[in-house]
Image (cartoon, coloured by chain):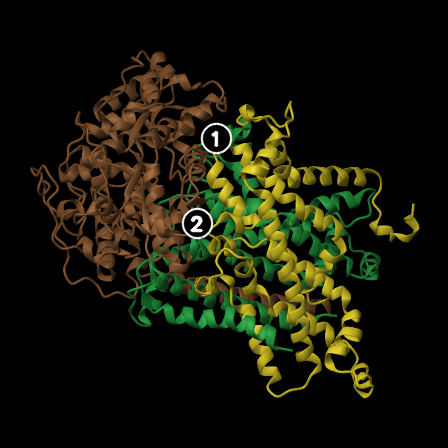
Amino acid sequence: MLAPSAVILGTFIIYPLIRAIWLGRQRCNPQGKNCDTTGWGQYTDVWRSEEFQQAIWVTIKFTLIVVPLGVALGVGLAVLADKYLGGIGVFRAIFSSTVATSVAVASLMWFFLLEPSLGVVANIGWINDLFPVVKEPGLLNDPGTALGSVALSSVWAGLGFTFILVTAGLQGIPADLHEAATIDGAGGTRRFWNVTLPLLGPTLLFVVVVLTTRAFQAYGEMDLLTSGGPAPQDSTTTVTYLVYGDTSEVRSDGGLQATTAVWLFVVLMGLALVQLRGLGRRVHYGN
Amino acid sequence: MATSAVPAMNRVTGWRAVGRYGLLIALSALVLFPIYTTVIAAFKPADKVLDNRLVPDSFTLDIFRDAWTEGRLGRFLLNSLVVAVVVTVAQVITSVLSAYSFSLIEFPGRNVLFLLFLATLLVPLEATLVVNRQTIDSLGWLNSYQGLAVPFLATAFGTFLMRQVFLTLPRDMRDAATIDGVGHLGFLRHVAVPLVRPTIGALALFSFLSTWNMYLWPTLVTTEEDFGTVQSGLKLLKSRALDTPNLVIAGTVIAAIPIFLVLLIFQRQLVRGLTAGAVKG
Amino acid sequence: MNTMRQQHQRRGWQVRAGVLVAGALVAVACSSGESILDAGLPPPDTVPVPPTAGPDGSVATTIPATTTTTPLADLPPCPIEALEEASGTVELTFWHGMNNELEDALTELTNEYNAGQDKVRVTLQNQGGYNETIDKYFQSGPGGRPEIVQMPEYMVQQTADSDSTVPIGACFEGTGFDDSAFLPRALNAYQTGGVQWSMPFNVSNPILYYNKKIFEDAGLDPEKPPQTLTELRQYSKKIVDSGAARFGIAFDTGQDNGGGWFLEQWFSKGKELFADNANGRSAPATQVMYNNDFGVELLTEVQSLVADGLAVNVGANPSGQDSFLKLADQEKPAAMTIGTSAALGTIKVVLDGGLIPGLTSDQFGIGPMPGPDEQPGVLVGGASLHIVADQGDAEAAASWDYIQHLVTAKAQSFWASKTGYVPVRTDALDLQPLKKTYRDDPRFKVAYDQLTASSDDPSSSGPVIGPLREIRAVNSDAVSAIFDGADVAATLEEAAAQSNRLIRNYNARN
């Protein structure tokens, strides 16, 4: 009964990982032939190389923008829409709607918003005057703003997901806790910080874990919006893009690709372990 | 109006209601803005693409027809659907089977094996793609449904989820069934699965969405247009037709519609699916 | 109870956050400053001596015969008879990177071929662009490869080294193919070591696109585009000063444009070698030579155009359209840009379709690529067609049949008039529709004239280097930095050093 799952997982997850670790010790020609084994030193060299460090830094920056912003906006919208108001269902549906967009769809939508010549945002007069970078060279072409713009599109795409989860979490908070707090004299804001937020803890943690993992693995946004970011700074080349992107230096050497991919695995594993331990602790403290 | 059922502090009236509505409307406009501009841009006739008014003064549906044919969207949507359905069904089946093994059957090394399963959750897709592509290539499965689907027929997440819910089934139910002479598969079919249907529904929706949204794998493993999915098809459309941007925009709109529909229909399962992993569930 | 839980939560968060931050800091602080492309490799034993002034072999008028590469007999043969012997229809897959108008023209040619006979059926597979085609080709094993693949000109060495293609020269010899009508430069571009590797199909070179109306407004003659970089500066100054446009010219730093390709073109115009060993044609190149005085002078001049506000840098231009879109910009347009002649057909269609308000297709003019001086000397750009080996004898023969169809005079006449590519054979000019196009719209002929006016010495054959694609990426970054104000000489040195490393790595493994 276990066999089907085990076979698939073994062939397509465990075997490739082991093989990639092995391949990561080699440098190959573009066809994957004539491989020279260079040894484990290749791993340290790749880790310490400029391109990789830069990619890790870009990935961290991206995550640091996407996750807090996404969580804050999601919570804000959810709290706002949590009250009983006529027609609140419509607003809830609107706020959830971005969960229906895939990476490709959301990225292309934002591409046609931000592109300096065709985009709507770039051609609104007063935005242009306030922020000339929007048109020249364009938010996606300027090394300073490219990553932020890609992050913005990612935050927007993830808004629906966060909103749905936080709303569900809010609905799980028993009303009598709120009533008790109000009776104790707590106003709206204090209730939020002292009752709502702590009880949202598990939900928020789950959201943070998912958003962080997604951010670290983000690829489609960079591929469609900036192709790895305005050169020469490669401002939007994350580690994933470094492995597979169209403009990455690494793509013509299967060995280097494997080394970088294995490092990505290690980083993600470390991240997940750190987060999982927190998750475990949450389970204990939950109601 | 059922105001009596709503706790007093949740009711918003008077000026506060107006303020809240205002805020809600403003935020909704912001959230909808990208979708709105995309749809509007798709409707603009070809010579007005650079004309960036927020409200178009003419509508034309021809561009959608062109995007459909030129972008071969019909074929891509079909492929995405086939692959997503196949993977969803397979993931549900394999997850249920393995989760059952891990929860209701005792065998030596069970815990170690389960940890190994969980460990695969830590391996990101990106680390395995290079080798997986080589495997698929050597099997001759490039440009095929098998190539697109087979690596994803099982998932540790599904196993984990179903195991959680199987563990909530009372032990005596299983024992009673054994006394009645019911085997494992029979028990699964007639007792366990019907009981956990909501979770299965959630897993199915989650699998469907994840597979539908896959971007990197289809681009890697297809070299012929007939076998791309909608996501890789959109990337191809952008490369091929950027001199007629409204074609690409129209293609994006068409690609977005199916999932919007799916989610409209399966709202409740969606929420359950998304919250399935959250601890409090 | 609440506060205790909150305290635990906060401490837990702090610990975790601390670990993450610490880890990140450790990671970042560990940068070695080395390139990822050196990972695992031992440092080079010798530092290559930078080239001194003056190219090698600058007086040679022919490309010397080579000595070190494999003779034709050792390479996969071209089994021409196999097509007649084949029963049933031979199915071929053709991977290409032609987009927009180019794809339409190619599709028409292919449909015509398929309809005209029933022995061979060709299916076109657009991979999305050259990069995707290259990557997918090299990632695939023999089972995953197509029968015909279109590879851009900078891939000729790497494709040859991959031992995965049938050299088209074998088919030439086997059939006694008459290539006398072909442009010698087009064929030579895809020849190394005396072996003709592939068939030139779409030949392009950079041309100057300019807005005639802006020229008029600035008091310049709209029929006399600038021919040299000096004139380019003068014209731009006049345009900017008169207010006719915001910028004189739009540059970009893309690999296949201003950052990479144009560099090679400018070196050819200046009769300078780009790489050693006669641009890699007499023997595999071992180092680049573009970090010489000529290169520094050239890029300093271009840099100053941007710095003086006469030119604008539109960035990396991944779609290839940004430099053109700058011409169409409503508020801060540029008057000119240099772009590939292959875009001519597409641009004409786009403008005729009214996509750009206020700009019709009659309003823009075409001139030759301005260079350091009045000398012509553009390189053969574009791509060529390779027959893939190990796909079956009948398939190879069928591929040869199809490729021949694409380079008949009639096909090239149609192809060139529709796209703006230069026809690979001179007799195409005598046939319709090209005859009419060149007569009625001489803009299409500029690229052809530029190419045929060039000489045949090694410097004008263009560099053939294994990792040329990666070297272009390095150069693209360098040009980008230069446009941002970096020191030209130092940047070029560094780019050359990196390029040389790439070449060393490549030669070690091929």
Q: Amino acid at mark 1?
A: Ser
Give the image location of residue C177, x and y in percent. 23, 41
Chain B, chosen colour in render? yellow
Q: Tell me where residue A45 sits by quadrant.
A: bottom left
Q: Is residue C131 depicted above or below B112 in this figure?
A: above
Is residue C312 at all visible to an observer of this figure?
no
Label 2 crowd (10 A; few <14 / some 14-19 / many >=20): some
Mark 2 lies on residue: C91
Q: Amino acid at mark 2?
A: Glu
Location of the N terminus of chain B by quadrant is top right
- Give the residue drawn at x 80%, y 40%: B17
Label 1 crowd (10 A; few <14 / some 14-19 / many >=20): many
Q: Secondary structure under badge 1?
A: loop
Q: Nearer the viewer, mark 1 or mark 2?
A: 2
C383 sits left or right of A153 in the view: left
User: B246 or A123, which is in the foreground?
Assistant: B246
- Give the residue drawn at x 65%, y 58%: B85
Give the image location of residue A286, x and y in percent. 71, 70
Q: Tell me where residue C292 sits by quadrant.
A: top left
Q: Is residue C119 depicted above or below A121 in this figure?
A: below
Chain ID at mark 2: C
Task: Give the Cα distance between marks 1 and 2.
Answer: 43 Å
Q: Secondary structure under badge 2?
A: strand
Q: Is residue B87 depicted above or below B243 in this figure?
A: below
Mark 1 lies on residue: A117
Asked if both marks, 1 and 2, belong to the same chain, the answer given is: no
What chain is colored green? Answer: A
A28 sits left or right of B240 in the view: left
Q: Is residue B159 depicted above or below C427 in this figure?
A: below
Is residue C54 at all visible to an observer of this figure?
yes
Chain C, chosen colour in render? brown
Give the image location of residue B170, x and y in percent. 79, 80
